[in-house]
Amino acid sequence: MPAKKPAGLIVRAETKAVRKERADGEAALKPREPLPIKPPARLAGHPAAGALWRRMIRMYSGLAAEIVSNLDQDMLVDYCILYEQSVEMDNLRTAARKNYNKSQRTLDRKAKDETVDAKVFIKLQNSVNWSLDEIIKLDARVDRKRSLLHTLRQSLYLTPRARAGFVPPEKPPEKPKTDMEKILAASEKLRPHAKQKTC
């Protein structure tokens, strides 16, 4: 069974009782204060995370449906910090890649030089291998961070699949009523609805 969506994202036909029950349940869990545009204290010293927080709050406040509330603040903070960490790891990977390329070029140059000491050559090989190992480790960590970011995006309704069904298809235009249908509809309005019981 798919996870339930907030009432503002539901487009299927529901009975009044079901809609009221859902709205009452959501209202009972709705905090009085909205999420602040100013990033929380946990994001102090995290400029990229703080900028993402402000962008997200502006985006959410522009929606008609209320998707996140103060109850989701910690998840949103975690998302912003994870995003900043993934950007930092991308930068570390770029630096590790530069070190690898530099070490590889030096090793290639020294390999052609017959006067190079064997110990120096081995150190260069180790440097190349270490740089490559760092790139592989960073790739694995970035993959795990991005997977977690994707999971949080789904929970925060930031993926197309999470929002699926939010925009209903257009209704087909109603067919104009025929003269006979208009007469029948008018006679229905005039007819008494309650029949008197006979003893």
Image (tube, grey):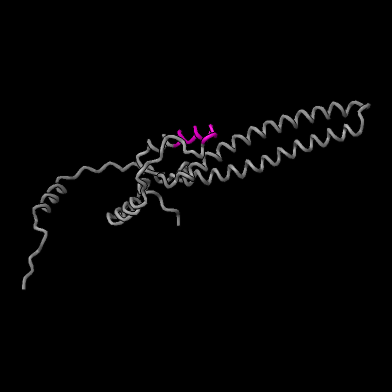
Q: Is residue 174 left or right of residue 114?
A: left
Left or right for 195, reference 32:
left
- Residue at 71% of width from left, 37% of height from top? 135
Query: Going 43% across and 45% down the picture, which residue do you hit?
Result: 164
Q: 186 or 72, which is in the foreground?
A: 72
Q: Quick one: which residue is furthest to the bottom in this view?
A: 199
Percent x, y for residue 89?
63, 36
Image: magenta residue range: 44-56
Q: Which quadrant: the N terminus?
A: bottom left
Give the x, y percent position of residue 109.
85, 26
Q: Nearer the viewer, residue 92 or 166?
A: 92
Q: Position of residue 190 (x, y in %)?
A: 8, 53
148 or 46, nearer to the observer: 46
Quarter of the view holding residue 92: top right
Q: Nearer the viewer, residue 167 or 27?
A: 27
Which residue shows up at 74% across the image and 40% down it?
133
Q: Is residue 181 above or below residue 38?
A: below
Majority secondary structure of magenta residues: helix
Give coordinates of residue 9: x percent, y percent.
38, 46
Say whether residue 17 is magenta: no
> Which quadrant of the figure contains the C terminus?
bottom left
In this view, which residue lies farthest toward the left? 199
Q: Please state if 155 lies on the left or on the right of 187 as rendered.
A: right
Q: Which residue shows up at 55% across the image and 38% down it?
A: 83
